[in-house]
Structure formats: structure tokens, C-alpha cells
Amino acid sequence: MTMHDIKINTERLLLRPLRTADAEDVFEWVGDERVARYMVYTTYSDIEQAREWLAFVEKDTSTYYFGFERVADGKLIGSGDIGVDSSKDCWGFGYNFRYDCWGMGYATEAVKAMIHYACVNFGARKFASSHCEPNLASGNVMKKCGLHFVGYGEFEKLDGSMKMRSMEYEGEITESVF
């Protein structure tokens, strides 16, 4: 099994490989300014940008990327990734969801599943992530997943158009989180 074949089931989600065929669904959140304002990418203006990103994801072997599919209706509602962050000697992760799926616990469910996968399959214990400062709900997700706030940082949109203050989180995870 390769990293592009992994599937993880949770109570309400199927974490599965992303495919270029997902471009239309992915565009629903990467093309939404309400979502993109908190992310390093700028709001996508057309579906072709989503296809290009998905083509990259299908080839990348340094990070585990997942589509978050809602089990109830088979709808792809978000995406995320997890991988080794050698600069911090830990595993890092990220995620985003369709705006209409915010506040429903999907992010916590997906992140816990990714962390659990890394713990069980790779012995990972140390994790880190960050969020744009105004996105406090994302900080709550990180706390629910066993991370704690360690300080402020900064990140820049990929196109260099904006710098944003970030809140940084780290944690050493034990089975008690799950």
C-alpha cells in the first residue's frame, strides 16, 4: 500500500486519497474567500487551479494528503494533510473545509484520525500546527486534539500578497487523546 492508497474511517468521515477528479468539489472551498482568508493560498479563481493543485498532490510523496468525505452522503467536504516537519522535529498537519461545514466537529474528527494514523503507523508522538490569528475556532480544534499554544508566528500567502500573524501549537500525543 502506498501513501496514495490510504483510507481512514471515522464515525462521520472517510479520509481518502485526493484525485484530480475531485477538482469541482475542492473548488467549493478553495474558491470561497470565507475559507481562503485564513489559508496560505489565495482564493482560487477557477477550477483549473484546483486541478493543478490536485495533480501536484497525486505526485507528492513527502506528505499524506486526504480528502474528507462525509459518510452520510459521499460528499467531499474538506481536505487535509499530515507529514514530518523536519524544521521542528515533529509531525505537522493542516486542514480546511467547506464553509457550510464549519462548527460541526468535522475538523476535530479528521485531525484526530490523521494524528492517530501517524502515531500507530509511524510511532509519531510530537505534533505541531498553526492557524491565522483571527481563526480561533481552529485553535480550539488543536486544543481538542492534544496540542497547546506555544506562541505567535507569521506566515505569508503563497503569492506574497499578505503576511498574517499566526498562533502556533505543539503537543506530545498519547493514546489518551483518542
Image (cartoon, helix red, strand yellow):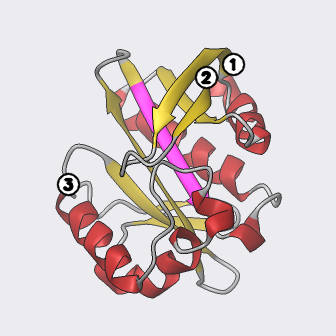
Describe residue 6's horizontal placement relative to residue 165 as left or right: left
Relative image position of residue 111 (x, y in whole percent):
59, 45
Q: CA distance from mark 1 to mark 3?
A: 29 Å
Position of the N terminus by quadrant = bottom left
| Residue sitting at x 76%, y 61% | 102
Give the residue at x 72% y 40%.
141
**Amino acid type assigned to the residue bearing label 2 in the image:** Tyr
Question: How busy is the neighbourhood of tag 2: few (under 14 within 10 Å), some, or many (20 plus)?
Answer: many
The quadrant in which residue 84 appears is top left
Dot 1 amino acid type: His
When asked about the image quadrant of residue 3, the answer is: bottom left
Q: Earlier in the sequence, mark 1 or mark 3?
A: 3
Give the mark nearest the N terminus, 2 or 3. Answer: 3
Q: Which residue is mark 1?
A: 148
Q: From the viewer's perspective, is 8 left or right of 51? A: right
**Residue 166 location in percent, x, y?**
60, 29
Task: Please tell me which residue is depicted at 21% across the width and 57% down the height of the picture.
Answer: 2
Q: Nearer the viewer, residue 108 or 41?
A: 41
Q: Is residue 112 magenta?
A: no
Numbered range of the magenta stretch = 91-96
- Residue at x-position 51% and y-position 69%: 30
Label 3 Cα neighbours within 10 Å, binned few <14 / some 14-19 / many ≥20: few
Foreground residue among 41 and 160: 160
Residue at mark 3: 60
Q: Position of residue 138 (x, y in %)?
A: 70, 42
Q: Main secondary structure of the magenta part?
A: strand
Q: Which mark is residue 169?
A: 2
Q: Residues at badges 2 and 1 in contact (C-beta under 8 Å)?
A: yes
Task: Please indicate whether residue 60 sits to the left or right of residue 170 in the image.
Answer: left
